Amino acid sequence: MQELILISVSSKNPETKNTLSYFMKTAGMQMHLWLAEGEYDQWAVECYTKTESKELSVIRKIANSMQLDINLVKQRNRQKKLLIADMDSTLIIGESLDEVAAKVGKGEEIANITLQSMRGELDFNQSIAQRVAMLKGTREDILLEIIEETYLNNGASLLAPTMKRRGASCYIVSGGFDFLTIPIAKKIGFDGSFSNKLEVENSLLTGNIVPPILGEHAKKEALNQLSKKYKIRNEDVAAIGDGANDLEMLKAAGLGIAFKGKQLLRDKIATHLNYTDLTGLLFLQGYTINDIYS
């Protein structure tokens, strides 16, 4: 039985097409359809192969050496009805809490805790409580500075317009904080957000999080809640994230994507985007570059 494979990369390199052609030939793949052929620096091609799923990891090692993403595509129910996206280091560049910490001279200390948590080395709920406690006394207006200084990852602004034209809904589900998830969701056309909330008194952070904490288990619960709201199955959901706290959510979704994921996600989630920007989430669902920029 032939499998459908998607090879993709975001690249300005004029030799990219030659690289893709060489890889397809070397891997014994039959080209089926170009979804993007260099437009807007995007490359995505569907191929057929008789490679067994278990052999994909071997081919992926070769693809990684050539800085290409390669993923097995399920052809049934390919375009999803609901998108759930993590925010920090997924929709946006960097970790928002780390940016707050940098403003008050605690950037390196808190960033180290964040990294350990995202790798799955620390309990997420405990680590986020620890990090927020270290920000006690921070002025609330610093949060407004973070909003102004936050940049989107490439492709983030294309997700909702493209998927909503086909009737899908889009939500941020983040272990980050609503001071940023709310304006980011509005900016990129998402329908809403689920996130944590910093407690503030007299315009200062108290060092506490307004309960309950939205952690790893809560992300999966949010996915289930939204599936129920829209009367769809989890199979109809696409989810994307980068950290260990996204694992349960990604495993529960019909299409779970590790976006430049920490090693824990790469080991446990089958679909990876390491060299393709967020536009790759749309290519994985079969959208062409013309669908995206129509």
Image (cartoon, rainbow, N blue to C red):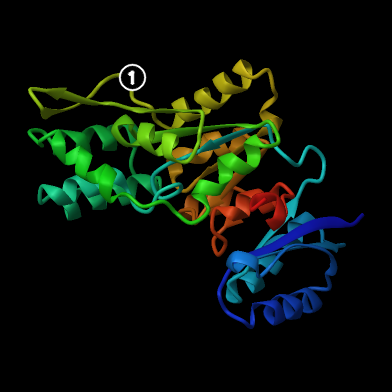
Crowding near the residue tagged with mark 1, few <14, some 14–19, many ≥20 C-alpha atoms within 10 Å: few
- Locate residue 245 relative to residue 238 in the image: left or right: left
Residue shown at 78% from the left, 37% from the top: 77
Along the line of sight, the residue nearer the viewer: 101 or 121: 101
Image x and y of residue 268, in percent: 58, 48
The part of the image, by quadrant, that contains residue 55 is bottom right
Relative height, residue 210 to residue 154 (above, below):
above
In the current view of this chain or complex, which residue is farthest to the front? Answer: 294
Along the line of sight, the residue nearer the viewer: 165 or 53: 165
The part of the image, by quadrant, that contains residue 59 is bottom right
Q: Amino acid at mark 1?
A: Pro
The part of the image, by quadrant, that contains residue 34 is bottom right
Image x and y of residue 252, in percent: 61, 32
- Locate residue 114 relative to residue 77 in the image: left or right: left
- Residue beneath label 1, please? 212
Along the line of sight, the residue nearer the viewer: 178 or 64: 178
Relative height, residue 249 to residue 59 (above, below):
above
Residue shown at 71% from the left, 46% from the top: 285
Residue shown at 92% from the left, 54% from the top: 1
Query: What secondary structure is marked by label 1?
Result: loop
In the current view of this chain or complex, which residue is farthest to the right? Answer: 1
Instruction: Tell me, yes or no, if residue 144 can be seen here.
Output: yes
Image x and y of residue 124, in percent: 35, 36
